């Protein structure tokens, strides 16, 4: 009853004039204002009208509160019982993950340090809904021009005209919806975005530029470019894409080009054309998986997509996944269903491609393993719309996608998590951070913030993989983000569960930026921290070739097995998913001490663009779990 009241009250507040009578009608879910979903946008590949199934956000901002679009189907909440997370299905087996293959390797330095938090900016101007680190060590952050509000104005009195859909009047928006954030000084520079990047996707191009795709409204088919330079601004091509891409995933392919997969009512993928070129409306490929995994509440947006080490593309949506050849555009095979709930937006779980071990695997191609953690029950979004936030999923699942007969192996996290972020640390361990313990993605749809980051060691014995770390006191709910920085710290930004900017809501629009120092930054370990000598280390790498790395390390003899060389491609992070995140652990030669406190090691660059797409990476030397600061290298 309370849920129903909440539902109606919200409607009355928000839609005083519109369709109150429409509550009981399915047609209510259609958008009377927008033409963008009419025509082909409403049709899937079978020509069926999908408008009734896909009912989230059917209205133009600010009317598009997600919960108004739910059909009032069954009273399932009365029958619902909150259950414990499902027991482990396939016991994980650590026999195939032996971290000690190198007989010389000593264990990581031990530390009881659980990490620490620093507030580095009280006001980022724009809430960090989408973020990416560029090779000039500037973080690009943006949210939505639909909001027509932020806390920083465009420079030089610039404004962007727009048609206000409520009043039908021409208005101007002088707020910036993107900023460049200096990770060292916390200085911000406003950026201009004319075509709305709300819930868009992105990646780093070979030349170190940000390439962003899709968004909402006038930005839904846009491709935007941002060069890493101190005076540059966005270069936008409004109608480049063949299909609307709202909540799509963009991934980098072996040649450095991009594929964009899915998006609301877009059961297709397409390849991003060169700047200034346009995809015609047929330049897209229908993907039945996206159609078939669309729940009433979707649960398959922002699919998890990875370029596998064999050149195929892995696509995971809701609870199903497949391998696709980007060469032939054929679906090669489907992988086993992952039970337990839904994993993609708005059930938003976390996922990463585990570090690719080029050091342990002479195998060609090297094995590729995907991890998917948390998310929500399929019905969680509907329940949240009626005011009940059911517990998020608490499982982690791994599958080797290069295996001809892959199986999911399940583990249990220390806590439930939905709308969290999963980052690969310079060491190759994972960090689970941000998010909530109940509910789903979408405005107001989550509760019980999960303030405790979790470290996950993929190669440790099963019982020793998870460690809970120091809690933050800032909830990072829907629309929050995180990124790995070259110094090994994690920058944490955003959180905005409100339509527009609201500083008084239960979960206010968050403009504060924090940095989290993981356990390897324990001050007691500082003396074991290697320091890369930039001038003597190769930064232009060619596929498969050996290159020299020089580092300083005081006061002790290093054994060959104590050192790992890792290479990390900085992802584009939004909505709990870090697109194009990739970690490679390189094959290396013997570590040689060249003089007191000075070492040299020759590593082998990744063999091909399939294993490591061309472009910029952060290179780290890791000494028994303590990483150096990263330096930017480029591979081609
Ligand atoms: C996968 O998700 C669908 C809903 O999209 C659900 O009906 C089905 O039962 C799920 N499968 C498993 C094995 O959990
Ligand atoms: C902020 O959110 C609160 C709680 O939902 C609401 O009462 C208030 O009207 C909102 N303020 C603005 C400016 O939207």
Image: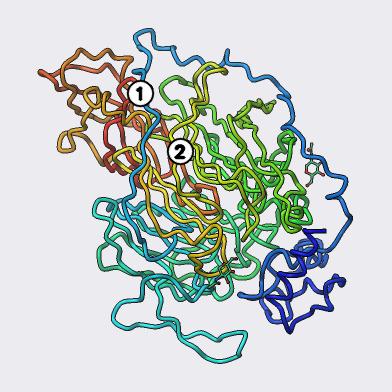
Q: Which quadrant is home to the C terminus? A: top left
Q: Is residue 280 above or below residue 117?
A: below
Q: Residue at x 60, y 90 (%)?
A: 168
Label 1: state its secondary structure: loop
| Whether residue 325 can be seen here | no
Please, which residue is most extreme toward the bottom here? 169
| Whether residue 150 can be seen here | yes
Q: Is residue 328 above or below residue 201?
A: above
Q: Is residue 105 above or below residue 255?
A: above
Q: Which residue is mark 1?
A: 625
Name the foreground residue: 424 vs 61.
61
User: Foreground mark, 2 or 1?
Assistant: 2
Quarter location, residue 333: top right
Q: Is mark 1 within 8 Å of ligand 1?
A: no
Q: Position of residue 404 (x, y in %)?
A: 67, 27
| Disc 1: CA contacts within 10 A as few (<14), some (14-19) or many (>=20) | many
């Amino acid at each position: 009853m309370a849920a129903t009241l909440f539902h109606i009250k919200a409607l009355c507040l928000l839609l005083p004039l519109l369709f109150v009578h429409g509550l009981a009608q399915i047609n209510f879910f259609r958008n009377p204002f927008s033409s963008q979903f009419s025509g082909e946008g409403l049709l899937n590949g079978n020509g069926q009208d999908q408008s009734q199934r896909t009912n989230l956000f059917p209205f133009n901002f600010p009317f598009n509160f997600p919960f108004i679009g739910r059909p009032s189907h069954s009273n399932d909440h009365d029958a619902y019982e909150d259950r414990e997370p499902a027991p482990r299905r396939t016991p994980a087996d650590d026999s195939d993950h032996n971290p000690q293959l190198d007989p010389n390797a000593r264990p990581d330095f031990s530390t009881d340090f659980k990490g620490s938090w620093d507030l580095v900016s009280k006001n980022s101007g724009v809430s960090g809904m989408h973020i990416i680190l560029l090779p000039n060590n500037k973080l690009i952050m943006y949210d939505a021009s639909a909001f027509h509000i932020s806390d920083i104005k465009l420079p030089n009195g610039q404004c962007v005209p727009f048609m206000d859909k409520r009043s039908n009047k021409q208005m101007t928006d002088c707020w910036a919806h993107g900023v460049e954030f200096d990770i060292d000084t916390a200085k911000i520079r406003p950026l201009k975005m004319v075509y709305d990047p709300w819930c868009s996707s992105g990646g780093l191009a070979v030349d170190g530029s940000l390439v962003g795709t899709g968004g909402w409204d006038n930005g839904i088919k846009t491709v935007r470019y941002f060069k890493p330079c101190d005076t540059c601004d966005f270069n936008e091509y409004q109608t480049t894409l063949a299909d609307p891409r709202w909540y799509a995933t963009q991934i980098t392919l072996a040649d450095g080009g991009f594929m964009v997969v899915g998006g609301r009512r877009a059961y297709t993928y397409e390849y991003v054309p060169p700047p200034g070129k346009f995809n015609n409306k047929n330049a897209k490929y229908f993907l039945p998986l996206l159609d078939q995994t669309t729940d009433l509440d979707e649960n398959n947006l922002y699919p998890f997509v990875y370029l596998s080490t064999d050149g195929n593309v892995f696509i995971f949506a809701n609870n199903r996944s497949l391998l696709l050849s980007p060469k032939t555009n054929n679906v090669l095979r489907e992988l086993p269903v992952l039970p337990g709930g839904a994993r993609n937006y708005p059930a938003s779980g976390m996922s990463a491609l585990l570090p690719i071990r080029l050091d342990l695997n002479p195998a060609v191609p090297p094995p590729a393993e995907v991890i998917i953690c948390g998310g929500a029950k399929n019905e969680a979004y509907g329940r949240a719309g009626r005011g009940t936030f059911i517990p998020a999923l608490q499982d982690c699942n791994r599958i080797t996608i290069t295996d001809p007969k892959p199986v999911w192996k399940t583990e249990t996290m220390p806590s439930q998590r939905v709308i969290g972020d999963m980052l690969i640390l310079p060491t190759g361990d994972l960090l689970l951070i941000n998010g909530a313990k109940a509910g789903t993605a979408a405005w107001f749809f989550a509760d019980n913030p999960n303030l405790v980051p979790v470290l996950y060691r993929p190669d440790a014995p099963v019982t020793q993989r998870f460690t809970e770390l120091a809690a933050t006191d800032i909830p990072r709910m829907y629309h929050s983000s995180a990124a790995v920085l070259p110094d090994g710290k994690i920058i944490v930004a955003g959180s905005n569960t409100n339509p527009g900017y609201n500083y008084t809501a239960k979960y206010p629009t968050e403009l504060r930026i924090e940095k989290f120092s993981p356990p390897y930054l324990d001050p007691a370990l500082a003396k074991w921290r290697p320091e890369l000598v930039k001038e003597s280390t190769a930064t232009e790498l060619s596929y498969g070739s050996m290159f020299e790395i020089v580092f300083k390390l005081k006061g002790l003899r290093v054994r060959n097995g104590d050192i790992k060389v890792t290479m990390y491609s900085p992802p584009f992070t939004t909505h709990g998913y870090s697109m194009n995140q990739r970690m490679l652990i390189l094959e290396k030669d013997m570590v040689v001490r060249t003089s007191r406190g000075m070492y040299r090691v020759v590593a082998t660059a990744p063999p091909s663009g399939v294993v490591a797409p061309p472009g910029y990476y952060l290179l780290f030397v890791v000494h028994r779990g303590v990483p150096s600061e990263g330096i930017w290298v480029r591979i081609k």
